[in-house]
Image (cartoon, rainbow, N blue to C red):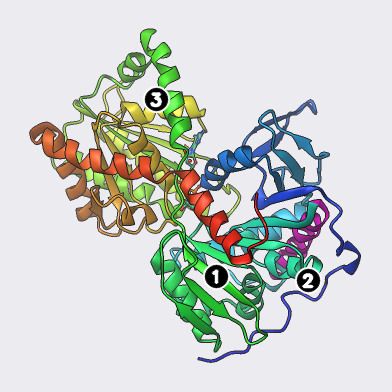
Amino acid sequence: MSETAPDSADGNVDSNVATGTGDNSFVVVANRLPVDMIIESDGTKSWQESPGGLVSALSPVLEKHQGCWVGWPGVTDEAPEPFRTERGVLLHPVELTQHDFEEFYEGFSNATLWPLYHNLIVTPEFNRSWWDAYRDVNLRFATDVATVAAPGATVWVQDYQLQLVPGILRQLRPDLTIGFFLHIPFPPPEIYRQLPWRNEMLRGLLDADLIGFHLASNLRNFVELCRGYDMEVSGEIKVREAGITITLPNGHSLGVGVFPISIDTSAIAATLAADTHHESHGELEQMHHNMGSPSTVFLGVDRLDYTKGILQRLLAFEELLDSGALDPKEVALVQLATPSRERIDSYRTTRSNVEEAVGRINGRFSQIGRPVVHYQHRSVTKDVLMRYYRLADVMLVTPFRDGMNLVAKEFVATRADSSGALVLSEFAGAADELTQAHLCNPFDIEDIKKAMLQATWGLKNNPEAMKERMSAMYNQVMEHDVDLWANAFLGALGVLEQKHSV
Ligand code: GDG
């Protein structure tokens, strides 16, 4: 296939914004701010950490660079004044109306792009009015960035909700250095090409100076797509470098590289150290007791999303109980499911299937006062989450498709003593690095069961081999933390332009 990309990503640009009036030399723009505004029924307003992997990864980077974060505050029709967090990050809220929320966020971002980019686990919806909202909202984000960015600033655009922002910004502020990072997979070209607005979307991205993906497979898909548009591609895939250069017919060239995201290992280490205080008060033992003192604890931690394969892991657990391979008096499965995108039909269906399975499994195998599945559809604090990681014997991470999956890395980071086991989907990006996990095909319930049993059997019968596996994964995560990710990306962006530093 050969196609011609349009000359400009978006024509509706207000040229009055084209001067750098802000004084921020490093700006991150993401759909969500790292905190959500909560409005109580009496009108009281407060802030709480917003969910998801992007916030977990970027918060420490912004704190380190004291940058400006442009994003939506999580409530509609409200845009509080910019303010600085206790940790020195300037938050610049962007207002979304209820209509924007429904059409840009729930619609185009999460019912069109999310399923399309996750290889059609559910069918994407293509709706022209959602596309109009996506363009409008991208223009608004870009306009706000153009106002806060200092002359010659570095702007790092995040994720699939804002793919038109590099193109619009390039028109508004040609002085900026623009990076773009995709946190979710990039699909094979034959899937991407289903998108009715594929040319505009691609053109918007290509105005960046650097585009980063988690995995080489994502990058290959992207490069193959670009080749279909007769773009010139040179170089080779390199990890943590802009190994590939793409040159557009208009002469603009950009770097493309593989930058596997990771976690803030030092923050986790600090939380674990602080938690020894709680241990002396028996908090961990109390939690274990509350679960019925099982000898093996399986743990799942996910946003409640159909990509995460929560139902499949519950079904695998149920079959293992049913066959007698696992004894319900000996084991427990804890599933923490953070509420997410709750008004979208496919998310409601996923929740109801998961909750039906939890009820059925408990009905079949629990004793009164001692559930075999402990399920929570609420967020927990980071401290409590760390305690669940520490309590788990076998961590279950079984997504059908996942850009990276930080939960897998967070669990491993709590294992300085090399204890425990990780069951990991081969379709999670993390599987590229955590090769010592018990890998499984999440589409194959028999394979999930096999991995769960191998992990459980290994912990009981072959502890030394299991320790070696965990120790290899622990070292991998410790040596490749979120700082390395951010520094590699920003370094590649700086090297490309040779003029900005943050
Ligand atoms: C996207 C991509 C990619 C979860 N529950 C609670 C809680 N969490 C935190 C975890 C972790 C984060 O949310 C989830 O990150 P994931 O990476 O697992 O998944 P997504 O949200 O889908 O993230 C993903 C990521 O972006 C980064 O690029 O890895 O592939 O889909 O950090 O700890 N945190 C707290 N309470 C909870 O109940 N405090």
Is residue 132 among what the camera can see? no
Is residue 68 among what the camera can see? yes
N-term mark: 2 or 1: 2
Residue position marked by numbered label 1 in the rendering: 255
Q: Which residue is drawn at 50% across and 29% down?
A: 382
Q: Which residue is drawn at 80% across and 28% down?
A: 43
Q: Residue 126 falls in which quadrant of the image?
A: bottom right
- Is the residue under label 3 in contact with that under label 2 (CB below 8 Å)? no
Q: Which residue is drawn at 76% across and 48% down?
A: 24
Question: Gap in Å between the C-alphas at discs 2 and 3?
Answer: 48 Å
The disc label shown at residue 25, or none: none
The mark lying in front, picked from 2 and 3, is 2
The mark lying in front, picked from 2 and 1, is 1
Instruction: From the top left corner, tell me how far across and down residue 320 is, in percent.
Output: 19, 42
- Under circle 1, the secondary element is strand
N-term mark: 2 or 3: 2
Q: What residue type is labelled 1?
A: Gly
Question: Gap in Å between the C-alphas at discs 3 and 1?
Answer: 41 Å
460 and 122: which is toward the camera: 460
Instruction: From the top left corner, tell me how far across and down residue 163 is, in percent.
Output: 64, 65
Name the residue at the right extreme: 16
Q: What residue type is labelled 3?
A: Arg
Residue position marked by numbered label 3 in the rendering: 387
Q: Which residue is drawn at 57% across and 76% down?
A: 195
Instruction: From the top left corner, tell me how far across and down residue 483 is, in percent.
Output: 50, 44
Q: In this view, does 428 lie above or below 120?
A: above
In screen coordinates, is 367 left or right of 347? left
* Magenta stretch encompasses residue 132: yes
N-term mark: 3 or 1: 1
Name the residue at the front extreme: 498
By secondary structure, the bulk of the magenta-drawn segment is best described as helix
